Image (spheres, grey):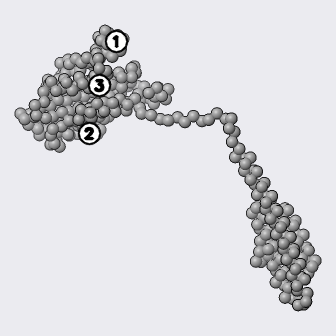
Amino acid sequence: MKEKLQKIKEEAVRNIEASADLSRLNDVRVAILGKKGELTAVLKSMKDLLPEERPAFGQLVNDIRADIERKLEEAKAALEEKELMLRLEQEVIDVTLPAKSNRIGHRHPNTIALEEVERIFIGMGYEVVEGPEVELDYYNFEALNIPANHPAKDEQDTFYVNEEIVLRTQTSPVQVRQMEKGKLPIRMIAPGRVFRSDEVDATHSPSFHQIEGLVIDRHITFADLKGTLEAFARELFGEETNVKFRPHHFPFTEPSAEVDVTCFKCGGKGCRFCKGSGWIEILGCGMVHPRVLRMSGIDPEEYSGFAFGMGLERIALLKYEIDDMRLLYENDERFLRQF
Ligand code: DAH
């Protein structure tokens, strides 16, 4: 019995010393001290001994058990220390490395310009509304007094989905949709994407953005139109800006005008930016045509209104002095970072 105990102990010590990690060490512990372990088995066999031999033997088993437990504890502490060191070594941080710079995104110049325009009109009590980009031919053309044979419907300009559906060529159809709702008065702007079958160049893109405006109420006159757009232009381009209304033609307004502002680069003297004229065109506008009002269910004898429409990209290009519209779409960071 004693020799057997001695052998168990020697083998245990050997196995403990050979354990390369904590999990293997635990296996060794279970194999010796566990319920079905070797030492436990020896203890169980004590019943075969003579009663007077039992106390001494019991003592011996306990001593050996204590020895083995101590060895296990020591080995465990050593292995834990080793694993900690290894981890510290792997997780070492080189505090002398240059830090990674955090690059934070920001609004696109188009968005900055749009939010500026929205801020100005919201300040004048306008509501911001939206309409569909895939639009009925009726809203995009017919209801805006652009009949079937009108050149603006030319296939070169318009993406037709089918005979009745187009990608809207302008944000003006949102005027009609808003008027049809029947809630008056109306004071709205409608920003959004529009589409035209155009080749890409410095000033054209098959997809760009417009901001539409519409006011309908009793007693609205051309003076309201002029005052509103003048206030808008001064707020957007600066207090010293002058505004000029040039007669023009749009099918859905009568009378119609295009609006020029004094070149903010040269103050009106004439420069490369305004091509020597001192003026820069920013939008189209006019008094809503009585026929358009009537088609949308509004009585032109009782109500009148004005409308305007501008190209968002054009405003962004002017405001930030960008000379090629393609830069707004290419998402080249060297460009976008500058805003
Ligand atoms: N929809 C016109 C265009 O795309 C712009 C425009 C002109 C809108 C005059 C208007 C307006 O509301 O009154 O060229």
The percent coordinates of residue 101 (x first, y second) are 57, 34
Q: Residue 159's spot in the image, x, y percent?
A: 29, 33
Query: Does the residue tagged 2 have its C-beta within 8 Å of any atom of ligand 1?
Result: no
Residue type at mark 1: give it: Cys
In the displayed structure, would residue 225 be above or below residue 17? above
Secondary structure of residue under mark 1: loop
Amino acid marked by disc 3: Glu
Between discs 3 and 2, the one toward the N terminus:
2
Q: CA distance from mark 3 to mark 2?
A: 21 Å
Residue at 92%, 79% (x, y): give it.
2
Q: Is residue 47 above or below residue 255?
A: below
**Viewer-closest of 186 and 249:** 186
**Quarter that holds the N terminus:** bottom right
What residue appears at the point 90 percent right and 69 percent down from the top-left corner?
10
In-front residue for pair 209/105: 105
Disc number at residue 266?
A: 1
**Which numbered disc, 3 or 1, marks the residue that appears first in the sequence?**
3
Question: Splitting the image into 4 quarters, where does residue 164 fall?
Answer: top left
State the separation of the CA atoms marked 3 and 1.
Answer: 18 Å
Q: Residues within 10 Å of mark 1 (few under 14, many from 20)?
A: some
Identified by mark 2, the residue type is Val
Badge nearest the viewer, 3 or 1: 3
Instruction: Give the crowd class for mark 2: few <14, some 14-19, many >=20 residues within 10 Å.
Output: some
Estimate the spatial distance between the alpha carbons at disc 1 and disc 2, rounded to whole Å: 35 Å
Residue beneath disc 3: 235
**Residue in the picture at 72% in, 48% down:** 88
Is the residue marked by circle 3 packed among few (<14), some (14-19), or many (20+) residues within 10 Å? some
Mark 1 vs 2: CB contact within 8 A: no
Residue in the picture at 20% in, 40% down = 177
